[in-house]
Amino acid sequence: MEKPKLEFLEVLKKGKNLLAFSSGADSTALYFLLKSYGVSFDIAIVDYGKRYQSILEIQRAKTLCFWDNKQCYVLKSPKIEKNFEHNARIIRYNFFQSLVLRHSYTNVILAHQLNDKFEWFLMQFCKGTNINAMLMQSCITQSIKGYTYNILRPMLGVYKKEILHYLKQQKIFYFEDFSNSDTHFKRNYFRYHFTHRILEEFKEGINFSFKLLEEFQSTLPLDDLGGYYCFDSTPKDFYAIDLAYKKLGYILSKKQKFEIQKYLNKQEYSLVFGNKIALEKGNNKIYIFPYISNISINKETKEIYRKMNLPKKFRQFYHYQQSLKTKPK
């Protein structure tokens, strides 16, 4: 059996890469696959202190990096009292973003695979959402404080069984996360009751259906303009808005989606969700961008932006972006 194929190899070989690592099967397989394909990278791992084996997992990560001459960044997470999956994700991604800014990484690599993609699809489908939110993106462009980088999932087309076979064939050690069998977690519930069983029988059809859905999604008029999105308002506003938020790394809740739908027919509106991503409509255009406040703009420049018909919150973001372009290197 051939080793699993990865996407984005050309991008990864040219970039400065940070692998999100856990010492589990998927991230361990991706670690050795990236090595085998000649991709250079460092790793980042979070210790949530939930399992006795956490110390061993961290030590495994450090040992791999020692022998392969890589950087290993470790974060000891504060104790999470409730809503573990949600809060752990926030801690994890904030950690990755801090490393991206500090060390100028161009790509953050995640080890999600086909089973994860299908689980996500089922969870969102059952929750009640649109096609954009159902599809786990293989590539998302993020912008933080004016710095742009990619979140890449190069194993999204790889079946979990292929990963386990690769690890066994190469005699590569990895840790089992026994919390994955706890069906109190929604993701594990779907995994145990549906995902593995359906994929076992219909893997090829599911992969093909995902490709068709992604082709449909790609027909939406949405281009990354340097860490933000701007497009003419159309009857498809909601789908494009939802997709733009997702591309900027923010998943809208059902409550937030309902709120957006209340404003869609208005000539102008301005919303901010999570104090992170802003949404504004003005001059029949939709703007979606990282929320920035307290930027000082002189009176003359404000007048220029007003004549450009830029919405008020977007002016802050736009001014910040322009200041980065003119800042001496």
Image (cartoon, rainbow, N blue to C red):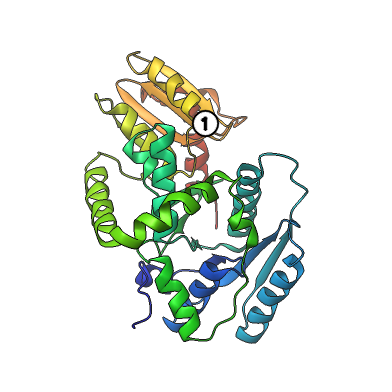
Q: Residue 208, relative to residue 283: is it above or below?
A: below
Q: In the rendering, at what x and y percent does residue 201 appear? A: 31, 60
The residue at the point 44 percent across, 42 percent down is 123
Q: Residue 309, relative to residue 37: is it above or below?
A: above
The residue at the point 54 percent across, 66 percent down is 19
The one nearer the camera, 245 or 325, is 245
The residue at the point 53 percent across, 86 percent down is 171
In the picture, measured across the screen, residue 270 lies left or right of residue 74, that is left
Residue 125 falls in which quadrant of the image?
top left
In the picture, measured across the screen, residue 4 lies left or right of residue 68, that is left
Residue 232 falls in which quadrant of the image?
top left
- Say if residue 328 shows up in the picture: yes
Q: Residue 324, relative to residue 106: is it above or below?
A: above
| The C terminus - image quarter | bottom right
Q: In the rendering, at what x and y percent does residue 325 appear? A: 47, 48
Q: How crowded is mark 1: few (under 14 residues within 10 Å), some or many (20 or more)?
A: many
Residue 95 falls in which quadrant of the image?
bottom right
| The N terminus - image quarter | bottom left
Q: In the rendering, at what x and y percent does residue 212 appear? A: 22, 50
The three-letter code of the residue at mark 1 reads Gln
- Say if residue 39 shows up in the picture: no
Count how many numbered circles sit on residues in the image. 1
Q: Residue at the far top: name it.
A: 266
The one nearer the camera, 117 or 258, is 117
Name the residue that disc number 1 marks: 316
Q: Residue 57, relative to residue 223: is it above or below?
A: below
The residue at the point 49 percent across, 24 percent down is 255
The one nearer the camera, 256 or 103, is 256
Q: In the rendering, at what x and y percent does residue 199 appear? A: 35, 58
Local secondary structure at mark 1: helix
